[in-house]
Amino acid sequence: MSQQINLISPLLLKKRYAFGLREMALGLGLTLAVALAWAGYLTYRADRLEKEAAQQEGRQAAAQQELDRLSAAATRPVSALLTERVKAAQARVAQREALLASMRSIIESTSAGFSPRLRALAQSSTEGVWLNGFTLSPDYVALKGSALNAGLVTTYMDRLGKQAPFAGMKFSGMEAVLAQPAGDGQAQPAGLPEHIDFALYSGSPKNPADKGGSDGR
C-alpha cells in the first residue's frame, strides 16, 4: 500500500500582494505631489498674510505719526506775532464798522424825508406853476418858482399841504413879484407869457444842504 505526500503546500507558496511595486510607487508619487501642492498653498497663504500684516502696520505707523503731529501742533504755544496780527485785524474791522455806522447815521440824519419830499413835490404839480429851484433839509424848506398868477400859487400850496411829507407845514415867508422882462444881453424865452416869480420859505436855513434846480415846468 502506497501513500502520496504533496510536498507543495499552499502555506509554503509565496504570497501575492494586491498592489505591486508599481502601484505603490504611483501612490507614493501622488501623495508626494499632494503634499507639495498643499505646502505651496500654505506658503503662498503665509506670504500673503505677511504682506497684509506689513501693510496694516504701515498704515498704523502713518496714523500714529499724524496723531503725534496733531498732538504736537495742539500743544504748541500760539505765536506772539500771529496773536498781534489777529488783534490788529480785529481792531481794524471794529474801526471800519464804527466808521460805517457813523456814516450811516449821518446819511440818515441828513437825508431823512428827502426822497418822500421829492415825490411829494412831483405829485403836487399844478398846471401854470413851475419850480425853478428848491432847498430841502430837516428844518428848512425853500421853494422858488413861477406862476401865471397869484391864485395858482395858493392852489399849489394847498395841493402841497395835502401831501404827507408837507402836512402841517406852515410857510413862514412868501415873496411874489411880477416877472421883469429880460434886460439887454439876456435872452427872453420865446413865447413865455406874463407871470410872477414867487418864493416860499419854512423853518430856519441853518444847513440847507439838499438843493434842486429847475424842474422845467
Image (tube, grey):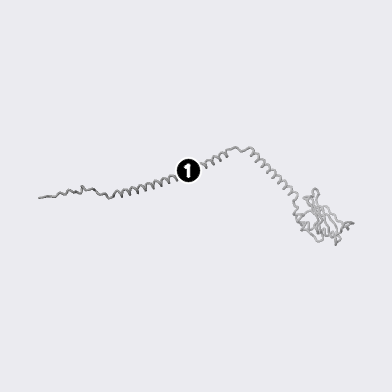
Q: Residue at x 44, y 44 (%)?
A: 47
Q: Furthest-right residue in view?
A: 184
Give the percent coordinates (x, y) of residue 92.
68, 42
Q: Which residue is mark 1?
A: 54
Q: Where in the figure is residue 79, as x and y percent of width and height? A: 62, 38
Residue 138: % across, % down = 77, 50
Name the side, left or right, on which 175 lies relative to 123.
right
SS for tag 1? helix
Q: Amino acid at mark 1?
A: Ala
Looking at the picture, tell me which residue is in the foreground, 169 or 133. 133
Q: Residue furthest left?
A: 1
Residue in view at x 38 percent, y 46 percent:
36
In front of the other: 153 or 101: 101
35 to the left or right of 75? left
Q: Which residue is painted at 47% across and 43% down in the image?
A: 54
Q: Is residue 12 left or right of residue 81?
A: left
Q: Quadrant of the C terminus?
A: bottom right
Q: Position of residue 16 (x, y in %)?
A: 25, 49
User: Which residue shows up at 73% across the image and 47% down it?
Assistant: 103
